[in-house]
Image (cartoon, grey):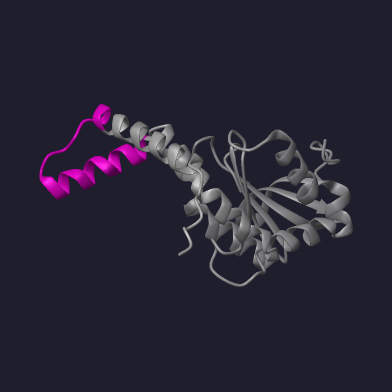
């Protein structure tokens, strides 16, 4: 779908060797590696694999790298400044994002024609530098918070329980916290829908 032939190792080279180590896939154009993709098991945490992938990419002159467990996809620009996390310019979460948006980004960053022409790198750098990144984060944080409290996320429930225990000595059960979060969420919704009144002039 992205223009690559997965059975042609001149294009999609599995177990590509880099200094005695192997990168799961190298996407290649004219005998030159353009993209490195490191693939982990579904559900596996990715943080501990960033350094190795980006060091391989940097040493081989590969300017676009991807780390994925099939569900989460982290896109990197290895030659940008900062630590490994700062070089990550985009994240795809298969279960949380719209299919059209996911497909669009895969085309932008990984379509063979875009990789070959250098357009994929231009697209990646544009996303990395864009001020929209900050605006999107700012606008999504309240939605993320609402999602956490309305779905009674397990991590949040555990955090509230532990904090409550530290403060009063007693640890509430999950049902008590979930009831509180639902109530809090409903109050927040009411607050957002209340009309804002202009101050009375004297």
Residue 3 percent location from the top left of the image: 86, 41
Question: Is 192 placed above or below 60 here?
Answer: above
Whether 165 is among the magenta residues is yes
**In the figure, is residue 34 to the left or right of 145?**
right
Residue 112 percent location from the top left of the image: 85, 47
Extreme-front residue of the structure: 202
- Give the residue displayed 75% in from the left and 62% down from the top: 126
Q: Quadrant of residue 50?
A: bottom right
Residue 19 visible, this orientation: no
Question: Is 173 placed above or below 143 here?
Answer: above
Q: Quadrant of residue 30?
A: bottom right
In the picture, the quarter occupied by the C terminus is bottom left
Q: Which residues make up the magenta segment?
A: 154-176
**In the figure, is residue 87 to the left or right of 178?**
right
Whether 19 is among the magenta residues is no
- Give the residue displayed 67% in from the left and 55% down from the top: 65
Extreme-top residue of the structure: 175
Mostly what secondary structure, the magenta segment?
helix
- Give the residue displayed 65% in from the left and 64% down from the top: 78
In the picture, the quarter occupied by the N terminus is top right
Of residues 98 and 70, the one nearer the viewer is 98
Residue 98 visible, this orientation: yes
**In the figure, is residue 169 to the left or right of 177?**
left
Question: Is 158 placed above or below 131 here?
Answer: above
- Give the residue displayed 69% in from the left and 66% down from the top: 129
Question: Is 85 placed above or below 177 here?
Answer: below
Of residues 37 and 194, the one nearer the viewer is 194
């Amino acid at each position: 779908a992205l223009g690559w032939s997965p059975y042609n190792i001149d294009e999609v080279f599995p177990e590509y060797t880099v200094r005695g180590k192997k990168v799961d896939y190298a996407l290649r154009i004219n005998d030159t590696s353009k993209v490195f993709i490191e693939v982990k098991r579904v559900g596996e945490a990715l943080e501990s694999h960033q350094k190795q992938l980006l060091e391989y990419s940097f040493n081989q002159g590969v300017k676009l790298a991807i780390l994925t467990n099939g569900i989460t996809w982290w896109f990197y620009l290895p030659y940008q400044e900062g630590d490994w996390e700062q070089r990550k310019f985009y994240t795809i979460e298969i279960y949380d994002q719209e299919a059209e948006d996911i497909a669009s980004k895969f085309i932008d960053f990984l379509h063979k024609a875009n990789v070959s022409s250098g357009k994929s790198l231009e697209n990646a750098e544009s996303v990395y530098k864009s001020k929209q990144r900050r605006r999107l984060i700012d606008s999504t944080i309240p939605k993320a918070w609402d999602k956490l409290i309305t779905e009674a996320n397990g991590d949040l429930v555990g955090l509230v329980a532990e904090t409550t225990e530290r403060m009063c000595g007693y640890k509430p059960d999950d049902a008590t916290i979930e009831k509180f979060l639902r109530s809090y969420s409903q109050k927040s919704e009411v607050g957002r829908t209340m009309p804002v009144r202009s101050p009375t002039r004297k």
